[in-house]
Amino acid sequence: MGKTPRVLILRAAGINRNSDAALAIELAGGRPEMVHINRLIAGERRLMDYAMLVVPGGFSYGDHLGAGKLLAIDLIHCLGDQITRFVADGRPVIGICNGFQALVKAGILPGIQLDGSSDTPQSVTLTDNASGRFECRWVRLAADPTSVCVFTRGIERPLEVPVAHGEGRFVARNDATLAALRAAGLVALRYIAANGGPPSYPENPNGSEDHIAGICNPGGNVLGLMPHPENAALPHQHPRWTREPLRNEGDGLALFRNAIRYAQGM
Ligand SMILES: NC(=O)CC[C@H](N)C(=O)O
């Protein structure tokens, strides 16, 4: 794929974190290109010409029918074949917040049937925060060391990153689905308390089951997460950057760097 992977940053009406994602990709060593979904649908750009795909956060199509739902319909019905090929080829895909919601509602994540049923490809979802309101705050995350996720590989210390969402509560269809998700190593990131233990509100800002903040597909090359690592890419984006020893970089950058490195090795 060459030294500087081309990374497609997806744009669509209402997506608003595309520039933040582009900056994070650039800092991580990739070459970001913002491409509107209509250009892909029209065939003016081809997904397979890129090494990585970012589905950024925002309020795509105004969150109508549920956050990410309309974008998910576009992804399945207009770009389904391209995305299926891209994912099957092992190329990295990250869906951030609204992007995560879209990937889940499109059935791209977790990407397999977890409970043996075959009626619908969607076995998990993201729904209204348990608090009943939009949550905008910094959280602490831990990467699950048993996860197959390529983005979180080798990340051993907690990550401090922001969340900003109204529909971030991760729920699985049932307990068996949740157990299967864990057993397959698809839980990539969890919210944790300041002392590293299990969180309560607001450390788990939305009431997600098993404190899940991010999941991946069985190949580990597709990650979706509610927090915004692209807004924790620079050291001074941290809210206590003047009061704590200055970090070399924002905690979120590690996820992007892992993905770029992985894309370079393909
Ligand atoms: N920052 C975001 O991407 C927000 C996602 C979505 N609009 C929500 O509120 O849940």
Image: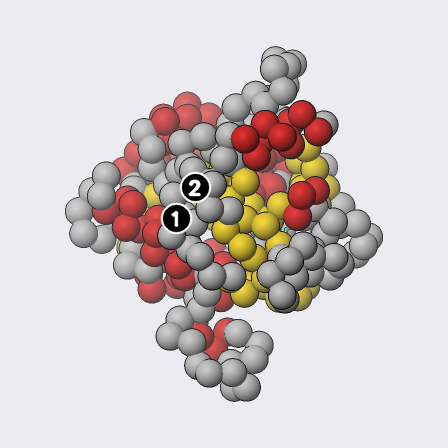
> Hey, which residue is sitting farthest left in the picture?
2
Helix, strand or loop for disc 2: loop
Identify the residue under disc 2: 149
Helix, strand or loop for disc 1: loop
Whether residue 152 can be seen here: yes
Query: Do the CB atoms of the residues marked 2 and 1 lie less than 8 Å apart?
Result: yes
- Residue 131 location (% of width, % of height): 81, 54
Instruction: Work out whether residue 255 or residue 53 is closer to the camera in this orientation and state it.
Output: 255
Image quarter in which the N terminus is found: top left
Q: Residue 163 lies in what quarter of the image?
A: bottom right
With respect to residue 12, does 28 lie above or below?
below
| Neighbour tally class for label 2: few under 14, some 14-19, many 20 plus, Cα within 10 Å | many
> How far is the residue under mark 2 from the one under mark 1?
7 Å
Identify the residue at image location x=42%, y=55%. Answer: 155
- Residue 231 location (% of width, % of height): 50, 64
Identify the residue at image location x=53%, y=74%. Answer: 238
Identify the residue under disc 1: 153
Residue type at mark 1 is Arg
| Residue 165 falls left or right of residue 16 | right
> Hey, which residue is sitting farthest bottom in the picture?
242
Indicate if the residue with disc 1 has its beta carbon within 8 Å of ligand 1: no
- Residue 259 location (% of width, % of height): 35, 48
- Residue 199 location (% of width, % of height): 69, 57
Q: Residue 106 lies in what quarter of the image?
A: top right
| Neighbour tally class for label 1: few under 14, some 14-19, many 20 plus, Cα within 10 Å | some
With respect to residue 211, does 254 lie above or below?
below
Indicate if the residue with disc 2 has its beta carbon within 8 Å of ligand 1: no
Residue type at mark 2 is Cys
Instruction: Work out whether residue 20 or residue 169 is closer to the camera in this orientation and state it.
Output: 169
Whether residue 38 can be seen here: no
Identify the residue at image location x=64%, y=27%. Answer: 177
